[in-house]
Image (cartoon, rainbow, N blue to C red):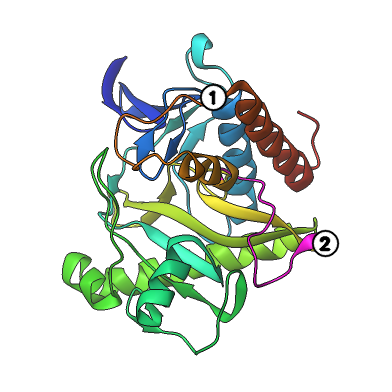
Amino acid sequence: MKLLHSGKVRDVYADGDDLILVASDRVSVYDVVLPTPIPDKGRLLTQLSLWWFEQLADLVPNHVVSATDVPAEFAGRAIRCRRLEMVPVECIARGYLTGLGLKEYERSGSVSGLQLGPGLVEASKLPEPIFTPTTKAPVGEHDEFMTYAEVVDTVGAETAEQLRDITVRVYRRGAELAAERGIIVADTKIELGWAPDGTLVLGDEVLTSDSSRFWPADSYEPGRPQFSFDKQYLRNWAAGTGWDKQAPAPEVPAEVVEMTRARYVEVYERLTGRTW
């Protein structure tokens, strides 16, 4: 195998015609990798993604070749994948207003150029899920919101429409299945790429605690931050340290590491019905 790329969280190896996608225990917030890993995180993300790929298989094809035909040292945290030409757009769907989407709304009344109604607050449920794409920034730089017109300029009208349609459909299916398990999916980011035949294929990870915001439905209340089963807890901790969100990031205390891991485990178990 040959290492092709080492990203913020995943390492990509070439193995013949396939790729081996390995999820590490690294964690990034505000597009900066923290120096402290979260134990089991790579395995949790991989296993949750594999579960979701199965739930979404009738909506969009995915890149999975095998979850078991991987090098032994990466067992549980790696997927053998098809090679894709990744789309240069971060595809995000939002059903609730929070995070950077909320900040953008407070600044301009819109997100990704979509004008939203007045009076929305932290965690407001939107009338319909919206497509709010961003740029794909290099490691250490920050993604920026893109308008739909900018996506069209980047990938063409036909592909832009497909990206929007697939992203919203994946969000709707994920939100529906999660709701049956008492979980709100506030938003999610997916990665899409072109297969050699021109088909758009779901890659990377899907509906995990790193790519989505998960809230317990029984304590949901708009107008305030929500309890989160994702790395929002870690983002909040990092923001509270006074860190300027530029590398290098601060070390994460042991109790924050353990709390983050516990939230990843709980949402995995609640969504899949499996014991970690």
Q: Amino acid at mark 2?
A: Asp
Magenta residues span: 218-231
- Sequence-first tag of 2 and 1: 1
In the rendered image of this protein, does residue 207 appear above or below residue 161?
A: above
Say if residue 166 shows up in the picture: no
In the image: residue 252, left or right of residue 136: right
Give the answer, above or below, for where 127 lies relative to 3.
below
- Let me know if residue 222 is in the magenta part: yes
Identify the secondary structure beneath mark 2: helix
Queried whether the magenta region covers residue 223, the answer comes back as yes
Give the spatial CA distance, label 2 vs label 1.
31 Å
Residue drawn at point x = 33 percent, y = 32 percent:
7
- The residue that mark 1 highlights is 77
Residue 241 x, y percent position in the rendering: 47, 38
**Residue 140: quadrant of the picture:** top left
Left or right of residue 52: residue 203: left
The extreme bottom residue here reads 118
Q: Nearer the viewer, residue 199 or 76?
A: 76
How many discs appear? 2
Residue 177 at x, y percent in the picture: 72, 60
| Residue type highlighted by circle 1 | Arg
Name the residue that disc number 2 marks.
Answer: 218
* Residue pictured at 57% horizontal, 24% vertical: 253
Relative height, residue 235 to residue 9 (above, below) = below
87 or 98, which lies in front?
A: 98
Indicate the position of residue 181 as horizontal and vertical percent values.
80, 55
| Residue 138 image offset from top left, x and y in percent | 23, 42
* Residue displayed at 25% across by 45% down: 141
Nearest the viewer among 167 and 114 is 114
Q: Which image quadrant: the C terminus?
A: top right
Q: Residue at x 48, y 34 (%)?
A: 65
